[in-house]
Amino acid sequence: MPINSFLGVFAKSPLKPLEDHINLVDKCSKGLLPFFQAVYAQDWKTAQETQKNISQLEKQADVIKRELRISLPVGIFMPIQRQDVLDLLTQQDKIANKAKDISGRILGRQLVIPVELQDSFMTYLKRCLDATNQATKVINELDDLLETGFKGRELRLVEDMIERLDEIEDDTDTIQISLRRSLLALEKDLNPVDVMFLYSIIEWVGELADISERVGSRLELMLAN
């Protein structure tokens, strides 16, 4: 999007680019669902195609990120500070980067998820993506927050949504502990290097929820200021 057009978007909706960015980030992270379904089937051609789609969405999000950083005016977002918007953007960007890294690491090694872990891993992945989706919903409330002057019913709605995001992230921590225990029980029957990578992937998937929670926390700090 050319800079002039981008500034035109600001004129209509100052926080629209931030919302556009998180919506792309959400689509990018959701690409992990069909990706892991292909991995489960060891259909590496489909996995490669879905990984490519994840990578393209991450690049599209990067374009918005760069344009937002370049064209974000100083001082038009009162009561939102420019640095607050940039901090939110940075956290959002980490979600897309992590989704790309997860799919790239799995594909590069053609890492097989043990059948014994597949159901619980998918439950874990979906719960982490619930966190990403909740962060997306929260950011998409920013325009309404701005219109209401960051107070009243809209503020309470967003605070409740952030609290819900924290609860989802807590769930992912619990599921992660259970999943790691299950992997520990299987270790002796698996390739040691694969085990190392599996622990890493479990941790990275959990970071999708952790970073999503940080998006909510960052916004919560903004609202408190």
Image (tube, helix red, strand yellow):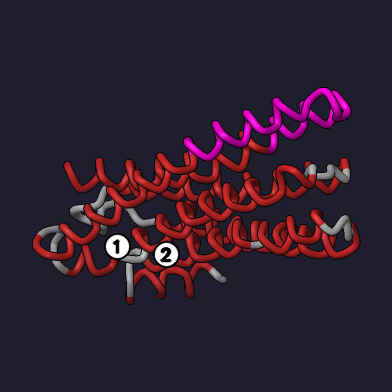
Q: How many marks?
A: 2
Whole-percent x, y for residue 26 in the image? 53, 61
The secondary structure that most of the magenta stretch takes on is helix
88 shown above or below 72: above
Quadrant position of residue 42: bottom right
Q: Which residue is drawn at 54% across and 45% down?
A: 208
Residue beneath label 2, please?
A: 19
Whole-percent x, y for residue 64 in the image? 54, 61
Name the kind of residue labelled 1 in the image: Leu
Q: Residue at x 70, y 25 (%)?
A: 184
Identify the residue at the far left of this view. Answer: 152
Quadrant position of residue 37: bottom right
**Residue sitting nearer the eye, 128 or 118:** 118
Name the kind of residue labelled 2 in the image: Glu
The magenta region covers: 173-201
Instruction: Give SS at disc 2.
Output: helix
Query: In what quadrant of the picture does the N terminus appear?
Result: bottom right
Q: In this view, does 23 lie to the left or right of 81?
A: right
**Residue sitting nearer the eye, 65 or 169:** 169
Q: Are marks 1 and 2 in contact (CB under 8 Å)?
A: yes
Residue beneath label 1, please?
A: 142
Is 200 colored magenta in this rendering?
Answer: yes
Whole-percent x, y for residue 129 in the image? 53, 55
Q: Spatial distance from mark 1 to mark 2, Cα to Cα?
A: 8 Å
Is 176 colored magenta in this rendering?
Answer: yes
**Residue sitting nearer the eye, 40 or 200:** 40
